Image (cartoon, coloured by chain):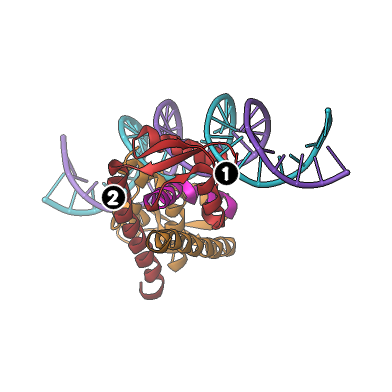
Chain colours: A orange, B red, C purple, D cyan
Amino acid sequence: MNVEDWKSQIKRGTLEFCVLLLIKQRPYYGYEIISMLEQYPIVAAKENTIYPLLRRLLKGEYISSSWQESTEGLPPRKYYTITEKGNEYLNAMCLEWDNLLTAISEIKGALNYG
Amino acid sequence: MNVEDWKSQIKRGTLEFCVLLLIKQRPYYGYEIISMLEQYPIVAAKENTIYPLLRRLLKGEYISSSWQESTEGLPPRKYYTITEKGNEYLNAMCLEWDNLLTAISEIKGALNYG
DNA sequence: TGATATACTGTGTTGTACGATGTATATGCA
DNA sequence: TGCATATACATCGTACAACACAGTATATCA
């Protein structure tokens, strides 16, 4: 039990949240998601985490996928698009995320006024 | 995979964070922590979650405990106090928590400007 | 031959949340 | 006496996401 372990635990759920927030914006392909998240070490994750996550979201029909040929002779890319079900899921997540921020903020506040 | 599952996942790490934030304020006993967290459904947890968590924190020496007799004939209470090591751990968590909020905020921001 | 970018797969481990259940003390009610 | 309720702590087993480690495959460029 240390801060590194905690950072790994805190990603549970948050990673899924981040990925859906990205895909809601526009279609993303897997490698692109990994690169985007790398910018933020606290939510960075490698292939062995992101691809299973994308597969779970596909299976739950929160996202859909389609292959696109690359223009520069690169391997084709699988683009992921959010579905209507995914949008509803994400909206529910956003509400719960706000609840979480409120809860932690108030618990922290008790440190000053409790 | 649904919002209820996600709420359970999001508690990973956050619960530990909340418990330490509470205990930093003043000594708390287990049942009191459970009652406090019940006020916020997103971080609410039962005995089977909180007591193992407290035992892990004790084992890691992030908190210490002492039994106190109850004044009204109720069962004795085990009070938990944060240690110096626990304070350092909590400070590191606070920094990472801010990183997380920044990351999610910027990823959300990409929805508007990206 | 090697590096880089893209894209996906598989095995096994770890650790936390949580369902279910148990132990124990004291009060209140019929 | 019997039963419910509140308080207070504990144990057992399961599910699952993150992740370490490793591998497969295509295509470009030096």
Identified at 52% across, 48% down, the residue is B32
Q: Is the magenta stretch mostly helix, strand or loop?
A: helix
Give C24 or B34, whichever is nearer the viewer.
Answer: C24
Which residues are the magenta region?
Answer: B1-24
Q: Earlier in the sequence, mark 2 or mark 1?
A: 1
Q: Quadrant of residue B72?
A: top right
Q: Answer above or below: position of A103 versus C2.
A: below
Which mark is drawn over residue B46? Answer: 1
Q: Mark 2 points at which residue?
A: B92
Q: Answer above or below: position of A29 versus B65.
A: below
**Is residue B19 highlighted in magenta?**
yes
Question: What percent of the width, then of the height, locates residue A61?
Answer: 58, 55
Q: Can residue B107 be seen in this view?
A: yes
Question: What percent of the width, then of the height, locates residue A92?
Answer: 56, 62
Give A12 or D7, whichever is nearer the viewer.
Answer: D7
Give the SS element for disc 2: helix
Q: Is residue B2 visible?
A: no
